[in-house]
Amino acid sequence: DYTNLIENEHGFMSWKIEGDKFVCINVYGDGKYWDEYMNELAKQLDCKTILGATTRKSCKAFLKKYNYKFVGYIFEKGVV
């Protein structure tokens, strides 16, 4: 497993590979560009799935626009 960061005039994206999964950690900027970029990169790296998350309260528009499906939730809790 390794983590990467790509920056260019479209913004930035950090990602890592876990098995056959391409995990998008952070994306900022041109969503259409990054969606296409990560799909091509995932193909080149023989990944079978692209995973990501959003902090938006509703991700319905994102799911529809970029053709992803909702598969679960991510929970966060501070360390006590």
Image (cartoon, rainbow, N blue to C red):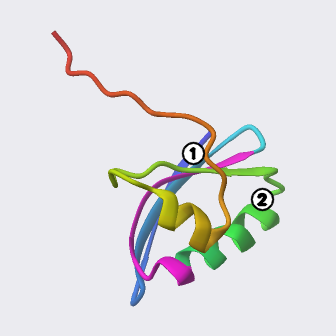
Position of 58 compared to 60: left or right? left
Compared to 6, does 2 lie above or below? above
Can you say which quadrant of the picture contains the C terminus? top left
Q: Residue 27 location in percent, x, y?
A: 42, 65
**Percent from the top left, x then y, of residue 47?**
79, 52
Asked which quadrant contains residue 75, the reply is top left
Q: Main secondary structure of the magenta part?
A: strand
Label 1 element class: loop
Residue pointed to by mark 1 = 2
Q: Which residue is mark 2?
A: 45
Magenta residues, start to end: 21-33
Image marks 2 and 1: residues in contact by CB distance under 8 Å: no
* Numbered label attached to residue 20: none
62 relative to 76 in the view: left or right:
right
Q: Quadrant of the N terminus?
A: top right
State the residue at coordinates (32%, 27%).
76
SS category of the residue bearing label 2? loop
Compared to residue 5, the image places residue 71 above or below, namely above
Question: In the rendered structure, which amino acid carries the disc numbered 1?
Answer: Tyr
- Name the image quarter holding residue 37: bottom right
For the residue pair 76 and 72, the one nearer the viewer reads as: 72
Answer with the quarter of the image where residue 72 lies: top right
Could you say which is closer to the camera, residue 74 or residue 57?
57
The amino acid sitting under disc 2 is Leu
Specify the farthest residue to the left: 80
| Up-down relation of residue 1 to residue 75 (above or below) | below
Q: Earlier in the sequence, mark 2 or mark 1?
A: 1
Q: Residue at x 73, y 73 (%)?
A: 40
